[in-house]
Structures are given as structure tokens and as C-alpha cells.
Amino acid sequence: MNSYKSLFLTIFITILLISVNAFAENSAKGTLTVDGDTTEIKHAYADIYEGDITIILVDNPIKKEMVPDSVYSLGEKGKIKGIVFVVSEGTKKLMSGGLYNLINAVHSHPKWNKLGTIGNGVLEVTKSEGDVLSAKIKTPSENEVDGHKFNYDISFSVSLKKEKLELQMSGKSDEPSKAFGEWVKALFEGDPEGYKKYASKELLQMLPEDVEELKAGMEFQQSFMPNMIYIESSEISGNKAELKAVGKRGEEISSGSITMLKEDGVWKVGEQSWESGEL
């Protein structure tokens, strides 16, 4: 991974200027105390998927491309402390037993970094209009789990408007590479027609016919696809090309292998695989 690190420091030196201020309108104010150690919570983020709103309240800012999937890895490294929970998009009430219904990324303690519960936390919504949700979440009394005591009292305001990630493509510019770039562009723009235009016949057979179902699948794919992609090499043999790429998303980097197929005179995306790592 050291070679990839050097590569990104050189290639993406201007690209890495993505501003964390994209979430500047989101804010939080309050404290989280675990075993007597109090953390001031200042930043709030939200992510909506299939009717669930994941709320992330932390002490340090997070780049938008790292929300929500990379939040826990940041906590494991001790870069953030805070709480993560889920609210129903329809009722604006706390969801119980959900995947993100955890106090997580609390401390960079060598033996643990999560408590695994929001305890007796209560959510009080103060504003829910349009794309804005404002509320307070607090524990009425101190909680204890696995020998650790905790409580929190945090007011927050988040934008529920879905923001598009900025896509950056660089490297090789031959026809197969350009076609792959168009496919990735359609994916991040949520454009089903463009997505299908550059999908191979084999890939098309795997896609749902229902447009809304396809859009949902594309939205899920957006959540883990790198948004900074550098095409290292492109080897063309007849109607087939093999691309090697390096991708970056937040602090995670990955190496990709993409098969491009020329069908009806147009280069299209076939199989691809990405192996993840970290800077």
C-alpha cells in the first residue's frame, strides 16, 4: 500500500482539496461522557437509505465521502468520538435494534471503542421541515454497560438533502478508459439510462427491469464505489480491454481490475473487482 500512498500524494494533490465544509450547515452542541471522560460534540451528519436516517454526532469534522460507512473505522483509529443512531424518516422516532443503533467510536481505548447501545436515550424533535431536522437526544439518567458508565445530552441540526459526491477521473484516456469513466459518471449522477448505455450485455441481464429498483441498487453501489479513480493501465486485445485502476474514497484506497468489452462498436463495462486498503 505504500506505493499507492505515494501515487495518491502525487496524482491527487489538487483533488484532495475537497472541503469538509460541505456539511457546514450541520451542527451539534452538547457532551458525551464515558467513564468520567467528557467529550464536546460539535458536528452532525445525516445519511438516508431506504427510509432510515442515520444520525452521526461527533467531536471532529468528517469528509462527506466518509459518511456513513467509514465512520466506525475513524473511531477505531481514535480520530473521532461520538454517537451514531437511526431515526425513522417517516415518524422521526428512534429506531430500535437497527444496524447503526450503537454508541460507537467513543474512545480510542486499546481494548474497546464502542459500547454497543444508546442506552435509555430519548429523542426530542424540535423541528422537522423540508430538508432540515433539528432535535435533542439525551440520557435521562446515567447508563452502565459492560462495566462502563456513560451519558450524553446533545442538541443537533442536520440537512437531509442528499449531496452528490464529487467524481474525479484521471489517468489513461483511451476509448475503454473513457467509456468506464462515463459509466462511473452515470452511476454517481443516478442516471439509469447512462448507466445501462455503458453496461455490457452480461451486466444488463443482471440489472432489474424496474427503474426505481435499479435506482435503489445504484444508490447502494454509490455508497462504496471510489469517487476518485486513477486508471493506471489499459491493455486492449481485439474487442476486450483490461483496465488497472487505483481508487480513493475518504481515507480508504483500493486497487481495481475492470474488464471492458466492445459490443456493437461501443466499449462497455463487464466484470470489475476492487480490493480495499487504507492510506
Image (spheres, helix red, strand yellow):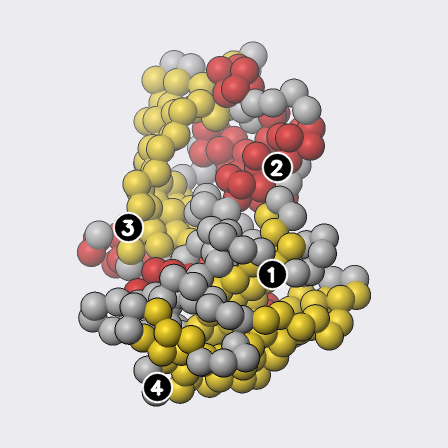
Could you tell me how many numbered marks the image carries? 4
Location of the C terminus by quadrant is: bottom left
What crowding class fits label 4: few (fewer than 14 Cα within 10 Å), some (14-19), or many (20 or more)?
A: few
Mark number for residue 216?
Answer: 2
Q: Are marks 4 and 1 in contact (CB under 8 Å)?
A: no
Query: Distance from label 2 to label 1 (Cα)?
Result: 23 Å
Q: Which one is in front, 151 or 80?
A: 151
Question: Is 257 situated above or below 162?
Answer: above
For label 3, the residue is: 277
Hey, what amino acid is under mark 1?
Leu
Label 1: element kind: loop
Mark 3 vs 4, N-terminal side? 4
The tag on residue 94 is: 1
Disc number for residue 37: 4
Circle 3/circle 4 CB separation < 8 Å? no
User: Residue 197: x, y in percent?
Assistant: 61, 25
For marks 3 and 2, the one nearer the N-term is 2
Badge 4 marks a residue whose secondary structure is strand
Q: Is residue 254 left or right of residue 100?
A: left
Label 3 or label 1, whichever comes before in sequence order: 1
Q: Is residue 239 visible?
A: yes
Quarter of the image holding residue 241?
top left
- Name the amino acid, label 2: Ala
